[in-house]
Amino acid sequence: EAGVAQSPRYKIIEKRQSVAFWCNPISGHATLYWYQQILGQGPKLLIQFQNNGVVDDSQLPKDRFSAERLKGVDSTLKIQPAKLEDSAVYLCASSPQGETQYFGPGTRLLVL
Amino acid sequence: EDQVTQSPEALRLQEGESSSLNCSYTVSGLRGLFWYRQDPGKGPEFLFTLYSAGEEKEKERLKATLTKKESFLHITAPKPEDSATYLCAVRSGGGADGLTFGKGTHLIIQP
C-alpha cells in the first residue's frame, strides 16, 4: 500500500513570497491533516479535513495560510505572504476516521 | 489546553544498555496516547496507541506503558538502528482528532 505522498520535498523562498505544498493521502483515508514542525519541536496541528470539509482549523494563521481539499482526496496548503518564522517542515498525515494517523515525508521550507 | 512533556530531551546509551523514556500529559478526556519514531529528514512513523491506564504494548525491543498521568517507552537491549527521535502525542475528547505532540526525546545508541 502506498503511503502519504508530499511535494515538493524542499523549497527555498524569500520573505513575502508565496508557496504551495501538495499532499496525496493513503487511498481510502477520509481524514487529512496538515502539521507544522519547527526545528527541535514536535508537530503542531494546523488543519484537519474530513472528506472535503474542515473539522478543525483553530491553529491555522488564517491571515496568511490557506488550505483546501477538493473532491475529498488531494490537499494543498498555501502560505501568502511567507514570513521568516514560517521556516519549518510541513507534514501531511491521513487516517481512516478517528484512527491512527500516518505521516508523509514532509516538505522542508526555508524562508530567507 | 492539552499538554505533553517528554523527558529527557536527549539520551545517549551504549548498545545493549536498557532505559526508559517518559511522557507526562494533561488532557481533558484522553482518547489515545500515541508513540511515533522520527528519523532525520523523515516523517513520524507510528509505533503504538494506548487507550487506558494499565495498558501495555510491545514491538521488538520496545514496550509502551500507560498510567493516568504518564506513559513510558521502555527500550530493552537497544541497537544502533534504534537511534531516532521518539515522539509522544495525545488525542483529547471532542470532535476533532488532531494530535498534541511533545518535543520528543532524541535517542542515540552507540555501538
Image: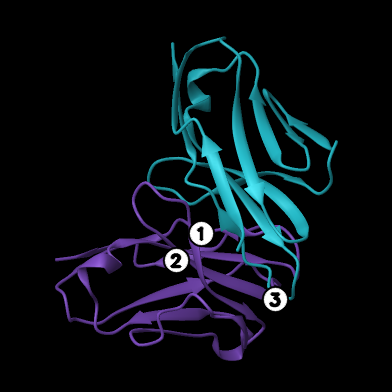
Chain colours: A purple, B cyan
Work out whether mark 2 precedes mark 1 in sequence or the reverse, and give the earlier one: 2
- Which residue is identified by label 2? A6
Query: Which corner quadrant holds the N terminus of chain B?
Result: bottom right
Query: Which corner quadrant holds the C terminus of chain B?
Result: top left
Residue B9 is drawn in which quadrant? Answer: top left
Residue depicted at x 60% and y 90%? A71
Question: In terms of secondary structure, where does tag 1 sit?
Answer: loop
In the image, A70: left or right of B91?
A: left
In the image, B27: left or right of A47?
A: right
Work out whether mark 2 precedes mark 3 in sequence or the reverse, and give the earlier one: 2
In the image, A3 versus A52, the foreground residue is: A52
Q: Are marks 3 and 1 in contact (CB under 8 Å)?
A: no
- Which residue is identified by label 1? A104
Looking at the picture, which amino acid does disc 3 mark? Ala
Real-space CA distance between mark 2 and mark 3, rounded to the nearest whole angstrom:
17 Å
Real-space CA distance between mark 2 and mark 1, rounded to the nearest whole angstrom:
6 Å
Quick check: do tags 2 and 1 share a chain? Answer: yes
- Which residue is identified by label 3? A30
Question: Pointer 3 indicates a residue of which chain?
Answer: A
Question: Where does the image place residue B61, in percent across and percent down from the top left?
Answer: 67, 22
Question: Can residue A108 be seen here?
Answer: no
